[in-house]
Amino acid sequence: MCGIVGYVGGNNAKDYIIDGLKKLEYRGYDSAGIALQSENGIVVRKKEGKIANLEALIENEKLYGTTGIGHTRWATHGAPSDINAHPHMSQDESIAIVHNGIVENYMDLKKMLNEEYGIVFKTETDSEVIAQLISVLNKGDLEKAVYDAVAMMRGAYAFGVIAKDEPNKIIAYRKDAPLIAGLGKGCNFIASDIPALLKYLDEIYLIENDEMVICTPERVIIKDKDGRELKRKVLHVNWSLEDAEKDGYEHFMLKEIYEQPKAIKETLNRRIDENDNITLDGITLTKEQLEDFNKVYIVACGTAYHAGLVGKYVIEKMARIPVEVDIASEFRYRDPFVDDKTLFIAISQSGETLDTLAALREAKSKGARILSIVNVVGSSVARESDDVFYTWAGPEIAVASTKAYTTQLVCMYLIALYMGRLRETISEEYYRSILAELKAAPAKVEKILSRASDIESLAKMLYNRSNVFFIGRGLDSAVAYEGSLKLKEISYINSFAIAAGELKHGTIALMEPETIVISLATQDALFEKMVSNIVEVKARMAHVVSIAKEGNTKIEETSTETVYIPQCADEVSPLLSVVPLQLFSYYVAREKGEDIDKPRNLAKSVTVE
Ligand code: M6R
């Protein structure tokens, strides 16, 4: 949700910034811009659309400056346009800023700046107030002006500032939006996220809330909100550049789908010792504490929420504790039953989703113990949790989440098995059998991937339909929600997921000849019931594509097409059955010629409410 990058050093900042912005384009891509400190003051260039448009705009210009900031935008206030693109310059052209987040009281600030200082705003954005505010407050000390501005602002933000009168310096400030500082050789950086800087360095500082960073070519200084200098541990980033690049794949999404066997293995292997005991690294809960919880809340958004639906099923089944799953944006506003006997599990790939973060804080304020399942190390959700259980999926760049989901499922299984064993609600035999199933999952996912061309053919046949339904029972219904989200977000096809047994209570009215129904029928215990639901839609002439386990050939009698996944225990089938759905969405979107990694209106990390 907007990406920011800044460079200060001895070379042309433009090249580093454009390169960094391309790596951050997943965060927002409706416009982009750059501001450089040049000999003639601050120069700003910005353009609606992808970064390629900005590159085209400046390609014949000799822009040069050794200090600069850049931005890639996901619009909140004001339509995507050249004028609303960042950076924003103050009226006197002394200050330029890039901003990620929202200034909630921007209307009041605008009014005050207009009435008291005669500022005429050029854009419809909330962000412009930051530039104007800092410029009117700046009496020769940029640092002080930024502190004074922040004291007047409400909201969530990370912003970077350059000033005409203070060359070779970038100041940035963080409050509830991600910000890092990168430590280069003879140069330093600010950025929203690590991929922007991977090419140039492997040492970063994580910036915390209410902290200021002052970057010069020689130093990075971090200060708290009262101006006190802080000591910060350097974080060594162990991602490789290839992790953040496409590596020969046409899209990041496809690369990430294919990375799942490795990611599942990694998430799993780090937690299982040679005697098949699960070690919950990052979790300091004692046996007594775990036994003492009387309720689990799983809260997340989007795909992570769908992983939570599977989590509910497996934790209730294995650990026999009541579990509620909630959408983060709903949780915090409905006065939920949470207290110190509640284990609150937040799931988030980015660890920066504001809805999830706000729900976590709400639960924390009511005394719950916070355990988070997060992919991005050191992210806000991770830092604000009591315990963190990382999904070791590596960077996920495509907006459509894939490997984050399957590794979130692995974490859910490990937590459920661990708790079940501790609470003696599962037998040792059951524990070992599910663990064996999990260990076998990467090879089974490989097998599904080796048949991707079958799914591609299916997508070529069905890509131009306009309505798709995903149905399933039990765990299959949780996967149906994820399959449906995947399809709609990248192919823009109207899709809808529903528990198969619920169809007859209304939704079946929508079935007509050639409606596509993707039916998940991987639950042995519910297979016959599911077949009945398939027959019901088939009788309305729907085109049914079933996902079933190898050997369950009976399904072919009632389906138009069948896609098989390897045999597995019902409990772990989501890990496998989601893969053909991810591939189907990918190939449908490709067939339609959509921008798969950067679907319209979306951004990878959603840091607004
Ligand atoms: O970073 P998070 O896991 O917290 O993100 C949550 C959702 O925004 C995310 O899963 C979103 O639904 C994806 N685009 C789904 O593919």
Image (tube, helix red, strand yellow):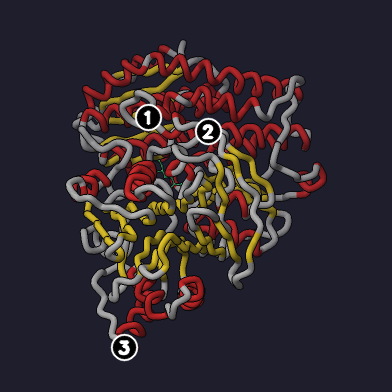
Q: Position of residue 44 (x, y in %)?
A: 27, 60
Residue annotated with mark 3: 115
Of 111 and 587, the residue lying toward us: 111
Residue annotated with mark 2: 393
Residue annotated with mark 1: 246
Residue 37 position by quadrant:
bottom left
Q: If you read the primary sequence from the N terminus, does the residue marked by circle 2 or circle 3 appear first? A: 3
Q: Do the residues bearing badges 2 and 3 touch, measured as CB atoms within 8 Å?
A: no
Q: Position of residue 189 (x, y in %)?
A: 46, 51
Q: What residue is shown at x 60% (from left), y 30% (from top)?
A: 267
Residue type for callout 2? Ala
Against 104, is 500 above or below? above
Q: If you read the primary sequence from the N terminus, does the residue marked by circle 3 or circle 1 appear first? A: 3
- Secondary structure beneath label 3: helix
- Secondary structure beneath label 2: loop
> CB of residue at label 3: within 8 Å of ligand 1?
no
Of 127 and 557, the residue lying toward us: 127
Report the Cα–Cα distance between label 2 and label 1. 15 Å
Residue type for callout 1? Lys
Of 221 and 166, the residue lying toward us: 166
